[in-house]
């Protein structure tokens, strides 16, 4: 094995590393190397980077370094000294360096930077003399002692602050800038004393000792609690990164007078995406000064007037960097005595709107391909574009009362109500309300529709409240434990108590709850987003992949889950190719249908049941008609009744409701109570529901199928296009499908005869219990399509109840017993494995069997990628997740294609076992997106011809100047601590 | 294709068919053919059998016959006439025939027999003259009209009864036998009138027309409601049989005077198994007369005095038939004017005790091999031998109050109590009690131990009551819907109301409930059973099979599920090779542990929890010590805590209990109520239980592991052999095993250090959720063994809650949507498929991975066979099912070996797809047992050397003369109707 190279030089127009070496050099080190060398050849202070392999070694060898490291660093330090023509610790003209951390992924939790390293009691004098600026030299020295003490040696930084205060107080001044050289010299003395008291030894005068202490500190910071926490919060798994690199770099100073300065800039507007060069700078300043807010920074455009030469040079660099990186750049620069130095560049963070606009613009500018554009936008960013958002400034200023789960994005606000009935009443009175409840149930549906937001104290992201809210696009915060109900008319949220009618604001994007009404910005679908999504559709349509079972599958559609005509219309507007799941149960909560449906449930015999169902039939027909009409010939997949019947009657504890119902339907209260009790179940998830109801009471599905057939016949008569499919839920054996299908076909034949039509319907099945997946070959004989119910499939393959797993899932995630919440991200080993089995077995019988998913996972990007890989023909998700799913689906296609290309480029490795191969593929798919972003974009033309594209020419003129977030990160500032 | 042969002749010392053709000729026809031909060459009246292929054809061709059938029947009828030297319908000397039905499996629901066919107004005169017995001839004629009218043409038989009453009334007589020839002639006239009125045409005088009508009737009876119901009740699937055959056979008469007679006999005693020839007979009688009870039949031994020649001939036939069939025979015979005819022979039905004794005796007699002996006994029959049984006579006489599920076999009786506390109190007062409840919960455990029987109104065969009762061997009837509770102190059972303290008797073998105390027989394990089971052990030990994944697996053990030292001892006595499942949760209901355990559950923090657990530790250690000691070096598999914590505290509705608990533990009632509410779950089956508790509260399992290690260390010090294994429940990801294993090993190391021991434990996992099975390769890296929890695996793969599926399972079974209740019989497509996946994946990592099952299925024979096939190393079942499982396991081995032999004998068929192959194997395994019984036993010596056999020489002397069931089935009697 070749000896690992541990240290990499950059400077003097060349570098040993480049941007492809983020894993070894960290983002900072890799980009510095890239900037330093041709073809960019930008002015970068010389330096060297100790690679992440050293960090890896350090933690694997009880915090020891590779044997050769010391010699290597010495060698590279000499090279740096030669390059800068100065020596570290030189008493006349000392080389000063900064020591910086940097992992492959930017990680604010880690130690950041130590500046001015190399100063000591002697070299400070040399620096003072050489720069002819004693104040500058002594200020640099005291800053170094403070930073080194605090960051590298853990001296409490309050001690240093106290010393400054003492000095200023003694002199009667208030500002740091008022301190003169002698004050700073006094301060240095005090600092050294503080250092000695805290560390137990003198402040090190040997610059190499200083440097090694700083290097140790950087590597040590990789495992500090903040960094660990950061990785935990950002879902960066242990072992995913090798560690941090350390960059040792010559100092340049922006505070050497009026020909010096420092600034940060963006190649485009990170808030709006507009193609304008923007940023901020300060002359005669270090980055620290900008952060401290002592002086107000100037707009970058001002630099053109103040120093046109530097500004022009910066503009050229901006253009060159954008062309090189094919992406918007976030840059840091320093001007030292009229000479420009680039200290950092990286792909800039941006808002969702900006991400979309830049991506589309850059395609128009031929800077990137459509595929690259599609990978530039996080699907989750689209949520911001589809919902009202809290005003950012107001949000920052407001006090967060409590934080729950961010269940359905967007800001909602209004007056608190505690029941669905109140929500309806108040809305009719023209009020905006937030429905606050322990949890919601299907009975609350009307109230949920009326509310501007929903807040619950229990339930996860797939609870009833969350699912319904997402379906309606209503902001929702659920599982907010800080919400309690001291009485019927009050709610305590965190420390504050509210009465009915009090105003609150919830943010379903963050899960936060606020008192009062915060300012809100309505957001709209931009033309650019429309364009981007049309590209996404194109790529999905043309996609082809081979499944694990060897089948070639073409296309990958996005459908919507929608139950109401209005919702169906919205789904269509959002680009859904049809309805993948139309739940029929919500329709029964309609006050027009509920009494008859309850009569049906409480009937003593088949005749009574049929009578009650006959009353519902025309109403169901009307519902279906509306949805079919809205989808205008696109597929509408109607699922027959799914939930257990007890969800439609009052709960046993609700005595008053039971009494009311008894009066309403003219039944004895005791008899009704008995019947309701008999409907209760120990484990309703595994109970008498779905097609099981059809085996015991065939008349229910017969009514529903009749309503479907009648609605379709009516559409046919009116010349409305239709493509209606019937879906049977909860199937575990092919005999259920066989029997229910036969019954349905008999009903359809009857309607055809009555109406003189010739209708036929695809009849398919949900695959939501493991046995259905495991016997998919048998199901496929009787089912025209499968739709995976991944929520139930997750519940049953894990044995996790989505209503109860909140008691332990946090422990699982925290202890990394599970990597992801399986109700958020479709799990590959459980439900995913079953889906793969179902795909293989199902298509072994019907090679073109249509497969889809209609669970909540259908809107989650990682899950969508897994669905694509497994070979599904479509995903169906709630209406407001359709745009994100269209994008995520395209990304899945692109990533899979890229991975396939990469695999064929690499030499085929020795054959692995099937299991190992699968695991590898999975890992690859999961990380592909990040890899692609990091990889140098392949300059290739997209072959996709814009068949249906509605893309309008991307222009910058529409860029609305939204609240600008000005990133204020420059070298030289104090490391951020939380 | 060769023309199908539809008709088969027998008689004159030869036959076209033989016993191997049960499928075509039915049991009756096949055995008649076999008896008729060499080597048996028994006196059988000639006849011919129309095969089941005709029945199959008949139903597949809208009740038409194959074209050639008419000619075939004519041909064979002529042959029969030649053989008997008489002609059908001959006016002087008519041939009379019987027409009988007969399927491959005896089926009482079908039409049975029409006798005396061939008589008409003319031939009756010939018969009278030829026999010189006009009364006999006219009686035969009127019987024929009645039977033909009733059975073949559907004339209501009451009409015929009324006519007899009229004739007798007119003459002033009461007995049928008092009617003389002219009375019978009058009756024939009346019968013909009745026939004409009902059928609409004259009684047919053409004997061929009579014969075809009878043949039609037999084939028609295959689909009559009784027959369909019978097949449904006996789980005979549609299509499993081709239909019924029809046998047309010359009549012989036992009522032709004192040298004629009829009887039924058994080659051994069907009640006790004793090797004595026994039976009953009547001279000058037809079978009908015996059934009618007009005369008391004689014991067979009496025949030796009355007609020694016939008796000797019969004895010889008995010996020949037993030698030929290698099994106990049930025979019917008729003596016509001094000549013996055999009318039927078949393997006789027998009690469990008799089955065991005969099987063991026959091996000693070298009549059968040990393998054959093992196949002779139904595992379910052993239940009768292990539990007290209701006295059969008393049972028949008693009124059945209600019928529930036969959940745990045996008779239990005593005074009714309604709570577990009462059961304990009353028992201490020396009373015997039956605990009658809606359902039981783990809190009732002490009361359940105290009770002699348990009766519940809800819950299935795997409900808490049923599982616990079977574990304890306590008779239990559950899910008895006719049990209601009008008040706290009364129970209504069917139509009767009982108070606390009233006596009832329940029969857990049948599910029936009776008032009062019925006589009960205590049963004991016989020496013969011991012998038989030792052979079973031998065969299982030596077994080898190759799993679907290609692994060779040796041996197949039976272990027991036992939680208490006493139970463990009993399991050992019953032959269990260890404890496959020791549940630790039942221990916590011990009043000594419950308060501390509740304190643990209700603790606010880890410290409080640890304090409470510390109190339980020594008590758990004592429990484990007892069990390890009882098993004396055999494996003891201890499962760590499994159920959700809320099972250990009162339910929210139990206000009084909550108040009592609050006082006891010194907690505010409201606070306690809140905590108890917080513990409730929507779907507890899928909730916070098993190892999930260990992820959230590691200290619970740590305490349990410490108790296990301490108990084992104590055994070690005392020189007690031990083989303790630790099992983790509810695992879904390898990380759970990895983490819990590491924690357990740390605890064990600590105990080793404290006690100076060097203990190590196998640590394995339950596989009871699909995800565990699907990722078994990962689990196998950290688990030393797998134990399949097929109950949860069934619940989750089907999505059926065992507590709730009662609402729909009957509809599923009735409509044949499911063939079996999956909680009774392990389902191959759901949990079975997952087990197969787990076997393959698990052993792909650890080729010798030990696999077992500890669900309730472990005691079910069909499930045991599936477990064997999948490649499990053992099954573990409740203590009282151990003997049956030992037998069923051996049968699985034998059937698999036989099937493998049969497969190698047959030419290897063209390669099928994997799926098809699996299905075939499964079907084969399922039907193999029946086939083996039907097949001619291969005369081969068993090669099994009795290594550990404790078999005592089988002797007949111990046969206890239990209540004898005398089967009274002879030809000539009226078809049974229910």
Image (tube, coloured by chain):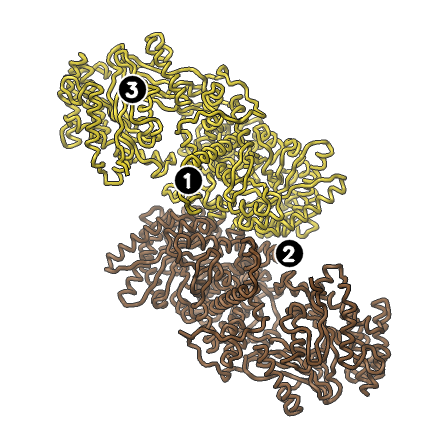
Chain colours: A yellow, B brown
**Residue furthest to the top:** A305
- Position of A336 relative to A561 (above/below): above
Which chain is mark 2 on?
A: B
Q: Position of residue A940 (x, y in %)?
A: 46, 25
Relative to B281, A437 lies left or right: left
| Mark sitting on residue A13 | 3
Q: Nearer the viewer, residue B726 or A313?
A: A313
Q: Which residue is mark 1?
A: A908
Check disc 3: other Cα within 10 Å, few if <14, some if 14-19, many if 20+.
some
Q: CA distance from mark 3 to mark 1?
A: 38 Å
Label 2 secondary element: loop
Q: Position of residue B940 (x, y in %)?
A: 51, 75
Q: Can marks 3 and 1 be said to lie on one chain?
A: yes
Asked whether the viewer can see residue A599, the reply is no
Asked whether the viewer can see residue B641, the reply is yes
Q: Nearer the viewer, residue A155 or A927?
A: A927
| Mark sitting on residue B815 | 2
């Amino acid at each position: 094995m070749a000896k690992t190279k541990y240290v990499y030089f950059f400077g003097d127009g060349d570098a040993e590393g480049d941007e492809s070496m983020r894993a070894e050099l960290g983002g900072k080190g890799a980009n510095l190397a890239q900037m330093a060398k041709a073809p960019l050849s930008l002015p970068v202070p010389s330096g060297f980077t100790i690679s992440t392999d050293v960090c890896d070694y350090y933690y694997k060898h009880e915090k020891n370094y590779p044997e050769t490291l010391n010699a290597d660093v010495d060698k590279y330090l000499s090279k740096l000294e030669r390059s800068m023509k100065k020596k570290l610790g030189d008493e006349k003209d000392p080389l000063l360096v900064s020591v910086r951390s940097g992992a492959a992924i930017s990680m604010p939790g880690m130690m950041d930077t130590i500046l001015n390293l190399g100063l000591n009691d002697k070299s400070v004098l040399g620096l003072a003399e050489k720069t002819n600026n004693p104040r500058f030299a002594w200020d640099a020295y005291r800053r170094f002692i403070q930073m080194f003490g605090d960051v590298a040696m853990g001296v409490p930084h309050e001690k240093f602050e106290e010393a400054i205060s003492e000095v200023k107080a003694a002199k009667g001044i208030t500002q740091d800038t008022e301190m003169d050289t002698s004050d700073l010299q006094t301060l240095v003395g005090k600092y050294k004393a503080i250092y000695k008291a805290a560390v137990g030894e003198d402040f090190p005068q040997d610059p190499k000792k200083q440097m090694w202490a700083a290097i140790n500190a950087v590597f040590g910071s990789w495992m500090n609690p903040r960094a660990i926490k950061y990785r935990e919060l950002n879902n960066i798994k242990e072992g995913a990164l090798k560690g941090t690199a350390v960059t040792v770099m010559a100092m340049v100073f922006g505070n050497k007078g009026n020909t010096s300065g420092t600034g940060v800039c963006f190649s485009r507007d990170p808030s709006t995406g507009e193609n304008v060069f923007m940023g901020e700078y300060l002359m005669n300043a270090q980055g620290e000064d900008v952060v401290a807010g002592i002086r107000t920074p100037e707009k970058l455009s001002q630099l053109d007037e103040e120093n046109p030469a530097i500004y022009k040079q910066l503009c050229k660099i901006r253009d060159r960097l954008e062309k090189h990186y094919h992406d918007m750049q976030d840059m840091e620069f320093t001007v030292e005595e009229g000479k420009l130095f680039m200290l950092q560049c990286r792909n800039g963070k941006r808002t969702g709107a900006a991400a979309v606009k830049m991506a589309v613009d850059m395609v128009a500018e031929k800077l990137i391909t459509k595929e690259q554009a599609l990978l530039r936008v996080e699907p989750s960013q689209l949520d911001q574009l589809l919902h009202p958002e809290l005003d950012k400034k107001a949000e920052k200023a407001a006090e967060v009362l409590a934080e729950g789960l961010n269940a359905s994005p967007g800001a909602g606000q209004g007056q608190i109500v505690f029941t669905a009935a109140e929500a309806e009443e108040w809305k009719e009175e023209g009020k905006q309300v937030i429905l606050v409840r322990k949890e919601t149930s299907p009975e609350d549906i009307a109230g949920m529709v009326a509310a501007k937001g929903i807040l619950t104290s229990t339930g996860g992201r797939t609870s009833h409240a969350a699912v319904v809210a997402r379906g309606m696009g209503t902001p929702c915060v659920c599982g907010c434990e800080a919400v309690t109900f001291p009485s019927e008319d009050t709610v305590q949220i965190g420390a504050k108590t509210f009465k009915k009618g009090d105003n609150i604001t919830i943010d379903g994007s963050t899960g936060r709850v606020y008192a009062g009404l915060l300012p809100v910005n309505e957001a709209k679908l931009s033309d650019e987003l429309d364009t981007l999504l049309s590209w996404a559709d194109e790529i999905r349509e043309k996609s082809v992949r081979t499944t694990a079972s060897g089948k070639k599958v073409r296309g990958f559609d996005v459908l919507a889950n929608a139950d109401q005509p209005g919702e169906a219309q919205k789904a269509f507007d959002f680009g859904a190719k049809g309805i993948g799941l139309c739940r029929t149960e919500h329709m029964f909560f309609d006050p027009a249908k509920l009494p008859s449906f309850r009569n049906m449930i409480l009937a003593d015999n088949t005749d009574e049941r049929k009578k009650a169902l006959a009353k519902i039939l025309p109403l169901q027909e009307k519902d279906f008609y509306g949805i079919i009409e809205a989808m205008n010939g696109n597929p509408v997949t109607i699922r027959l009744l799914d939930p257990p019947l007890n969800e439609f009657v009052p709960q046993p504890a609700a005595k008053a409701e039971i009494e009311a119902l008894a009066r309403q339907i003219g039944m004895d209260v005791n008899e009704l109570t008995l019947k309701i009790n008999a409907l209760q179940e120990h484990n309703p998830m595994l109970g008498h529901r779905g097609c099981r109801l059809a085996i015991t009471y065939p008349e229910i599905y017969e009514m529903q199928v009749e309503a479907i057939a009648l609605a379709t016949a009516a559409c046919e008569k009116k010349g409305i296009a239709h493509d209606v499919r019937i879906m049977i839920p909860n199937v575990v054996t092919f005999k259920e499908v066989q029997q229910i299908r036969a019954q349905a076909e008999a009903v359809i034949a009857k309607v055809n005869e009555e109406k003189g039509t010739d209708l036929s319907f695809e009849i398919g099945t949900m695959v939501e219990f493991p046995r259905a997946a495991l016997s998919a070959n048998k199901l496929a004989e009787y089912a025209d399509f499968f739709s995976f119910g991944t929520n139930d499939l997750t519940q049953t393959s894990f044995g996790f109840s989505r209503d109860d797993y909140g008691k332990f899932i946090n422990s699982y995630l925290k202890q990394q017993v599970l990597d992801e919440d399986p109700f958020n991200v479709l799990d590959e080993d459980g439900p995913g494995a079953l889906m793969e089995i179902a795909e293989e077995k199902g298509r072994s019988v019907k090679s073109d069997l249509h497969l889809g998913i209609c669970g909540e996972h259908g809107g989650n990007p990682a899950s969508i990628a897994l669905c694509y890989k497994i070979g599904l023909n479509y995903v169906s998700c709630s209406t407001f997740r359709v745009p994100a799913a269209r994008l995520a689906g395209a990304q899945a296609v692109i990533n899979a294609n890229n991975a396939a290309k990469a695999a064929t480029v690499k030499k085929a490795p020795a054959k692995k076992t099937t299991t190992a191969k699968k695991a590898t593929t999975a890992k690859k798919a999961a990380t592909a997106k990040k890899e692609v972003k990091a990889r140098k974009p392949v300059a290739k033309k997209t072959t996709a011809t814009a068949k249906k594209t509605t893309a309008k020419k991307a222009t910058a003129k529409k860029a609305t100047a939204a609240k600008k977030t000005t990133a204020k990160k420059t070298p030289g500032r104090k490391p951020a601590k939380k």
